[in-house]
Each structure stands twice: as structure tokens, then as C-alpha cells.
Image (cartoon, rainbow, N blue to C red):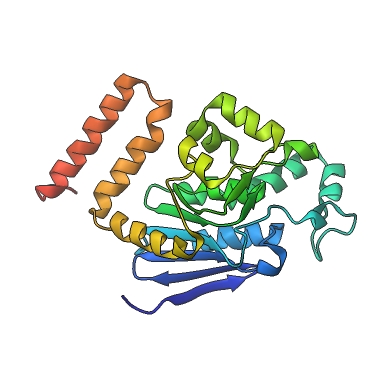
């Protein structure tokens, strides 16, 4: 292993790369890694800054909480320095408001790229936008003190940072509805049992467990992993016949590649 290279460090986000593993760290523990538009832009930039050699991305938060969600300063009249407040955005036109939310969502979408496997290492609070950021990743390893909650509906809002799709996919419509509307907390045992988390470990073992998982994910050939992720991620929207067709096409590509016949 080489020493990690610091690729980006701004607005509460640090990206480091060590061989085939990148780590994205939320770096504002004093505010429990509360999120802001500047942080979302930095997350989007982190995704665009990944070297092509990266195969696994680990997302983590410094301090006791993964992310306590949106910084409430966004709802004050003054908002953030140099940023329109959410109240200002609400007073603007529909197109401008839609474009602003779409830009925020970009920070939550690149984690699903087929050429990456992404792991959220989650401890303490992961609330609202923090919960949705964890849901943006392919896999979640949680500390035993984790507390997930989707609080947007309780505040008169909706989860709009791409979290509703993976939540329904993981736990089903009825449980997702109950989680969102009640805004209740979900601990580690329930998260693992419901499929929200792959593994729960003591807090002091979280980093080690994630390193072990990342190493295991790197064991398989990269192209086979990319094809497998694409098959699995698209399975829910394909018919059985379409999935069979996709499997045949993917396997054909793999066999030709192994035989040295690929383009």
C-alpha cells in the first residue's frame, strides 16, 4: 500500500486516495457534520476528482456523528455567506428552484456509478440529509451507536436528496412510509435486520471492519464487478426476460474478454 494522497480538502469534505481505495471524509465534527450547499458542491467535486484507478470509495464522518443532517442555518433569512437562503429560493421561480435542488442532488448520485463500489461507515447520528447520504452508497457498515432518522416530513418537507428510491428498495414501501412520516430513530440492530445496513460492529471496530470489507471487494476482477453491479442495480426495473437478456449479454462480454477476443 502507498501513503494516501490528499486530492481535495474544502467546505467540510476531504478526499484522499490510496491505491484503489478513495476515502471521502466529512470534516466538521463540531457541527456534527451538518450539511450545506457548499458541502454538497464539494461532494460533487470529489466524485469528479476520482482517479480512474479507484474501485472502492469509503464515506465516513469525523467525530461522534456521521452527519446530523442539514444545517438549520439554511432556513434563516440570512442563510449562508454568499448563498441564497432556502427562503430566498422558495420565493424565486419554479425553474430556478428546480435547478437548485437538482444541483444539490448531484452530490448524492455519483456514488451509484457502476465502476465503483461505495461503502458508508456510519456512527452516531445519520439524520435527514445524513441518512440520505448513507443511502446513496451501495453498502453500509454501522457502529452499534448508530441512529438513523428521516426527519424531513416532520419538518414539513420531503426527503429530496435521492434517498427515497434506495430506502423503498431496501425496506419496502410500507416500512419506508412509516420511517419517513414518523421520523423515528432506527438503531443498529433494526438497521441490519431491515436491510439498511450490511453489518453492525462496536464503534472502535468500525474503521477496521470497513477496511476488511474494502479489501474483500477488491479481490474480484474489476470488469466482472462492474458487470455484476450493473446487472443487480438494474434488476428491479427489468422484467425477468429482460434480465435474462442482460445476463446473457454481460456473460458474453466476460467470456470474450477472458478469451482475449474483446475489442
Residue 219 drawn at (x, y percent)? 24, 57
Quadrant position of residue 160 = top right
Residue lying farthest to the right in this orientation: 77
Residue 98 drawn at (x, y percent)? 72, 41
**Relative to residue 62, is residue 177 depicted above or below?**
above
Residue 129 drawn at (x, y percent)? 65, 49
| Residue at image location 39% in from the left, 25% down from the top | 238
Location of the N terminus by quadrant is bottom left
**Relative to residue 227, is residue 126 depicted above or below?**
below
Q: Nearer the viewer, residue 25 or 38?
A: 25
The count of marks equals 0
Q: Nearer the viewer, residue 145 or 57?
A: 145
Q: Nearer the viewer, residue 157 or 186?
A: 186
| Residue at image location 22% in from the left, 31% down from the top | 248
Residue 9 drawn at (x, y percent)? 58, 73
Determine if residue 157 is in view: no
Q: Is residue 102 left or right of residue 141?
A: right
Q: Nearer the viewer, residue 15 or 172?
A: 172
Residue lying farthest to the left in this orientation: 259
Determine if residue 142 is in view: yes
Q: Is residue 107 left or right of residue 253?
A: right
Q: Is residue 235 left or right of residue 108?
A: left
Residue lying farthest to the bottom in this orientation: 3
Q: Is residue 161 left or right of residue 141?
A: right
Amino acid at each position: 500500500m502507498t501513503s494516501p494522497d490528499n486530492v481535495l480538502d474544502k467546505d467540510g469534505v476531504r478526499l484522499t486516495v490510496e491505491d484503489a481505495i478513495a476515502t471521502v471524509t466529512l470534516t466538521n465534527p463540531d457541527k456534527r457534520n451538518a450539511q450545506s450547499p457548499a458541502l454538497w458542491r464539494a461532494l460533487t467535486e470529489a466524485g469528479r476528482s476520482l482517479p480512474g484507478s479507484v474501485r472502492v470509495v469509503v464515506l465516513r464522518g469525523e467525530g461522534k456523528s456521521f452527519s446530523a443532517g442539514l444545517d438549520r442555518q439554511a432556513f434563516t433569512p440570512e442563510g449562508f455567506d454568499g448563498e441564497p437562503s432556502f427562503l430566498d429560493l422558495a420565493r424565486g421561480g419554479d425553474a430556478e428552484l428546480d435547478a437548485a435542488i437538482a444541483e444539490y442532488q448531484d452530490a448524492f448520485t455519483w456514488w451509484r456509478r457502476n465502476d465503483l463500489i461505495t461503502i458508508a461507515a456510519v456512527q452516531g447520528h445519520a439524520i435527514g440529509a445524513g441518512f440520505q447520504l448513507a443511502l446513496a452508497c451501495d453498502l453500509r457498515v454501522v457502529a452499534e451507536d448508530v441512529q438513523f432518522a428521516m426527519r424531513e416530513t416532520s419538518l414539513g418537507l420531503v426527503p429530496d436528496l435521492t434517498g427515497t428510491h434506495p430506502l423503498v428498495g431496501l425496506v419496502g414501501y410500507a416500512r419506508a412510509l412509516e420511517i419517513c412520516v414518523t421520523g423515528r430513530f432506527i438503531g443498529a440492530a433494526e438497521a441490519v435486520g431491515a436491510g439498511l445496513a450490511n453489518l453492525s460492529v462496536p464503534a472502535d471496530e468500525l474503521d477496521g471492519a470497513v477496511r476488511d470489507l474494502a479489501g474483500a471487494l477488491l479481490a474480484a476482477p474489476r470488469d466482472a464487478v462492474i458487470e455484476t453491479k450493473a446487472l443487480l442495480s438494474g434488476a428491479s426495473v427489468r422484467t425477468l426476460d429482460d434480465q435474462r437478456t442482460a445476463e446473457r449479454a454481460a456473460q458474453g462480454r466476460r467470456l470474450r474478454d477472458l478469451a482475449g477476443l474483446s475489442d
